[in-house]
Amino acid sequence: MALGISLGCAEEAPPPPPPPEIAVTSVVQRDQPVTLEMVGETRGSIDIPIRARVDGFLDGMHFKEGRTVEKGQLLYSIDPRPFEAKVAEADGHVAEAVTAVAKARADLDRIRPLAEMHAVSQQDLDSAVAQYEAALGKRQAARAQREQAEIELGYTKVFAPVGGRIGITEVRIGEYVGAGVNSLLNYVSKIDPIRVRFAIDERNYLKIARRIAARAGEDTEGPGLELTLADGTMHEHRGRIVGTDAAIDAATGTFTLEADFPNPDRVVLAGQFARVTAVIGERKGALLVPGRAVNEIQGSYRIFVVSAEGVVSMRDIELGPRVDRFRIVEKGLQPGDQIALEGLQKLKDGMTVTGVSTALDELGNIVGSAEPSGA
């Protein structure tokens, strides 16, 4: 009797395991701006090299490297003594020329009445006139040489042509500078606004150009641009396109644009890499899914839909642009569909799971979960 009871218990089948729990979320439907992201490099809205225009020994630096300088601020000074000597020499030539003009004028005034009385020949008068005019020409040349000497003396002081941030000096006090050697002294970069140069392909250029043309009546400066910095933070000021290349580069198939962004705090410096984001359109009632829910197999995209009863069905989908951590779905899904977020490698078409509803924020990040949504 005891043996029979033991055999009966051994023949009972164990209960089936419960369906696996799978995180699911609803397909997001919303009006979605379509953006284009481009990688660019920052530069000053004005970048001006500071060069020496006369030869001489550098005898003064009047700024702190890497700081902001004002327009007209004295930056460098070159030993002025040789140029002061040239000005003094030119002053002497001008004085000689002025004296020569006075003498020639006096000679002409004395000879002209005599010529009218035929006391001297016409040749003597012509010679006096010629000497006077020659003296006037020499005086003019002497004054021009003096002016040139003063200009060169002025070049011994180098001033900031624009306000902006000045870099590390290329020369030091005591070095010989000039047009032939060590002419480049420094750079001044105006970084408010900061300029970003970036390139796009021909197809995306057409999208941006059409959007600017469509909004020409309401926004002559085109759509606002956003700037994302190297640390992932968003620059707080929007920018606008201020310049474009004349043509598409046939070798690379790209088109170069430049945009200015206000930079009042001068946080962004020239030479940084940044991402520029432009709105190129809007999808009404677009369907979006998290990128982590999409399974790619040899260039095809699939997603697992979980019904209210917990039945899994695999769908082929067509994807559109990326939006943060979401992807726009062109075909294959309907509003309200529940899709699997995790364990995609273990899911099969037709299997039964327990869907655990999972909340996402606007960027596609998981923020929490709720009770199971399927049997």
Image (tube, helix red, strand yellow):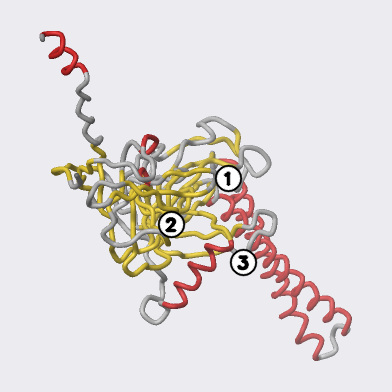
Per the image, label 3 sits on a secondary structure element best described as: loop
Q: Find residue 180 and report its image quarter.
A: top right
Q: Which residue sits at x=40%, y=40%?
A: 63
As measured in the structure, the alpha-carbon distance from the residue carrying label 2 to the one carrying label 1 is 52 Å
Q: Which residue sits at x=15%, y=13%?
A: 4
Per the image, label 2 sits on a secondary structure element best described as: strand
Other-residue count near label 2 (Cα within 10 Å), few / some / many at <14 / 14–19 / ≥20: some
Q: How many marks?
A: 3
Is any atom of residue 229 visible in this view? yes
Q: Which residue sits at x=45%, y=64%?
A: 241
Q: Which residue is labeled 3 in the image?
A: 246
Per the image, label 1 sits on a secondary structure element best described as: loop
Q: Find residue 61 and report its image quarter.
A: top left
Other-residue count near label 3 (Cα within 10 Å), few / some / many at <14 / 14–19 / ≥20: few
Q: Is residue 55 left or right of residue 281?
A: right
Q: Position of residue 239 (x, y in %)?
A: 38, 60
Q: Which residue is labeled 1 in the image?
A: 52
Q: Position of residue 141 (x, y in %)?
A: 70, 64
Q: Which residue is labeled 2 in the image?
A: 321
Q: Give the foreground label among 3 and 2.
A: 2
